[in-house]
Image (spheres, rainbow, N blue to C red):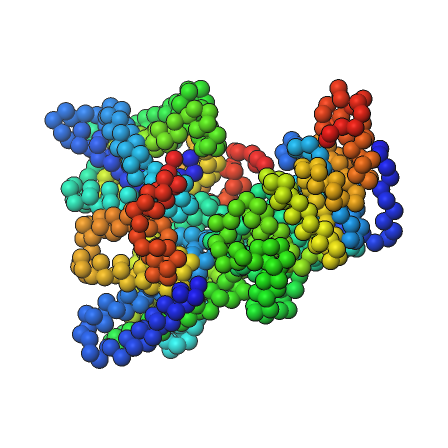
Amino acid sequence: MQAGRRLAYGALVVLALSALLPPHLNGNWVHVLTLFFMMSSLAQAWNLIGGFAGYASFGNVTFFGVGAYACAYAMNALHWPFATAFLLAVVAGAALAAVLGWPILRLRGHYFAIATLGIAIGMQALVAELPPLGKGSGMTLPINSNFHFFYWSMLGILMASIALTAFIAQSRFGYALVAIRENEEAAAVLGINAARAKVFAWSLSAAITGAAGATYAYWTSFIDPPTVFDLNFNVLMIIMTLLGGAGSIVGPTLGAFILSAIGEYLGAQSVSPWHTVVLGAIIVLVVVLLPRGLMPYLTGNLRAFNLNALRAQLRASRV
Amino acid sequence: MSAMAAPDLGTSTAIAARDVVVRFGGLLAVNGVTLSVAPGEILGLIGPNGAGKTTLLSVMSGTQRPTSGIVWIGDTDITRVPTYRIVRLGVARTFQVVKPFANLTVRENVAVGALYGRHGNDRSSRAAFAAADMVLERVGLAPEAKRQASELTLAGRKRLEIAKALATDPRVLLLDEVMAGLTPHETDRAMDLLRDVNASGVTLVVVEHVMRAIMGISQRVAVLHQGRLIAQGLPQAVVADPLVIEAYLGKRYAGGSHGHA
Amino acid sequence: MNVINIAHGAFIMLGAYTSYWLFVGPMHLDPFLSIPLAMIVMFVLAYLIQRFIVNQVIRAPMLATFLLTFALSIIIANVAQIYWSSDIRSITTAYSGSSITFGAITIPWVRLWTLVIAIVMTLGLQTFMTHSKIGRAIRATSMDVDAARLSGVGVGHIYALTFGIGGALAAAAGSLVSVSYAITPNMGDSFVVRAFVVSVLGGLGNVTGALVGGLVYGVIESFGALIFGEGYKDVVALAVLLLVILFRPYGLVGRATA
């Protein structure tokens, strides 16, 4: 945990310095980095519920969509300024997670995964039917072409989520989440109110995700249900987290960085079928070969890549 | 209740169950058990496999809701109280199949108990870790503090299970076969530990198959058979009880002398 | 078997394309007759996928198999798109337009045949699972892998067989829907979620329950569309899913077990 925290502080310093970059970058790089900050934030948020508490949510993209729509509605219909619309999105995400979390977080394993997947698909279908939200044809937001603003906003969300994770990791609450992940019944007999801890973790996760969704909506100035409730976002959050190391502090950002870099190399602007095939292949490799992610190698908890250890791990995970 | 009437406990009990029934589908795991444990007592809970010992322990710790019946801690009815709050009222348990937090260190495992147990709400993280260190010292796990829980031997994991429970500062500690699978030497150490814990004022309910251990530390023994309490009393008297011998060995042996139950 | 196979939708799609190519090819094979061929092809493919890929993480946490099969599904769908393009294709047979009328109700023949074949296959699967040696081995393995292995069941083979059977059934489903629905590389997506919902409604691991679940789901979807409007049918169906998971996690027809 110590080494993990040092890495987190290092990452925060690097990110803080990257705030100085925009004036020296061309528009494309500003766009690429803004997207990277956004995906990192989403992965960091997923890590709180999926990595720390061990509840693999396939419904986190719901909070992204809800945040985006809350912001769009507040700015478009209520003519609120972005700052208040942003706050509304954060509160809406957290509140929705709290309401859904009480029943849903009682489920485990497949049932939790299916239920959250159902929520994600159901919410997309629901939003696509609501007249105030433009039904399926989407919503427009006031146009703001100051792209540096979005760069800094997403960067701010990412730094806040890393700082929050670093704080939680060494707190009483963080130990409760990890205990729940490792063995929920054993956590309960030590005095942990698992239901409350899980709901709180999911709400924090949803608040960050909603913030990113709101910023995304304002950034692109047009949203529609298939874009902001895209399940592929949710899968990316998970795979970035797993690649970096679920339950670590900055693993998700590391994973997001690697996947974004690969995507950039393959030409992320034109999403071709081959691009998706490569993404699929990366997921297969990560899941089979790196189930604990890269972070344990960086923090020294696992010794350098070792073929025998890999063989042993594979032997243990198959029948 | 053949062997002997329960000792007079006066008005104070540490933990008590009345008419507890637990039904799993068609199976009656616990069938109307009434039992009370006095403050400071060590009660041994024995019985053949499937007698309902673990289920009764789970009811007392709140990890299993009884189908009917009532459970008290002192004079607080805890039948419908969630597990985590029962812990904060001072009841802790261990699991027969140990449940360490495998990816945390031994010290962190114990600290979780100190962070969230009976005093969890009113002490700092630093104080909780200090309390965890004291528990580790007491159970003899201090040298292993920095290792991952998954690296411990079985005896070590059994000790860790006790240490986690102790870290919650219980008044009543429910122990589910903490000596199963240990060598005789390790069993002796575990018995010394339990006596030491009891001497500090903790009431113990000990489920155990190792008869040497049960006979050695219990002040009173209760016997469960097919979900019912068939005997309770002083250890030597209970094991001589024909009903108990029959429960363990079948009717054929019941007429014989002292069973080696 | 405690594996959620997201690639099931991709298998359905491959089944549909198999029927399509056999139909437009020189053999001009009727889609109903190509079902056995599609099943054999997909059985072999699914068996190999399980044996060599999914099996690597079968004991890892559930998330691993979930993600792995998701990855396989996007790989299969996109490779299909690369080779077959994303053009929408359909199968039009001589009898596609004909239907049968019971009083006020008109049912297309192809749909009726689809229903009959689906019921026959479900009952066949049920019989296979309860009476055949392999079926019993599958159920034993799903209850306790290690106990099954100790009893002499080759669990690696059984896992792969189960996956293969699932693949074959997906292929049959693909052939069946190919006569009524458009065929595209992404056609499987909408079926995966419905397959989940139906399985959960019927109770996971319950074969005839799945049939009941399918009927109930179809009725709910239709009534949801009727009462709230066409667009709400998914919302209603998923709301029902959540309620069932929360209150009857063992399915509508199953019983709670300890």
List x then y, in percent, for residue B213.
Answer: 70, 41
Label count reads 0
- Say above or below: A238 vs C162: below
Please tell me which residue is depicted at 56% across the width and 58% down the height of the picture: B142
List x then y, in percent, for residue B187.
Answer: 64, 43
- Give the position of the N terminus of chain C as an image quadrant: top left
List x then y, in percent, for residue A144.
Answer: 27, 76
Q: Quadrant of residue A225?
A: bottom left
Whether residue C222 is visible to the viewer of this picture, yes or no, is no
List x then y, in percent, for residue A315.
Answer: 36, 39
- Say above or below: A98 vs C225: below
Q: Quadrant of residue B33?
A: top right
- Give the position of the C terminus of chain C as an image quadrant: top right
Q: Nearer the viewer, residue B185 or C112?
A: B185
Please tell me which residue is depicted at 31% across the width and 59% down the height of the picture: A255
Left or right position of B110 against C6: right
Left or right position of C105 against B185: left
* Extreme residue toward the front, this view: B185
Left or right position of C148 against C7: right
Left or right position of C230 against B111: left
Please tell me which residue is depicted at 34% across the width and 46% down the height of the picture: A309
- Say above or below: A229 vs C176: below
* Extreme residue toward the left, this view: C26
Q: Nearer the viewer, residue B231 or B71?
A: B231
Whether residue C250 is visible to the viewer of this picture, yes or no, is yes
Please tell me which residue is depicted at 26% across the width and 69% down the height of the picture: A33
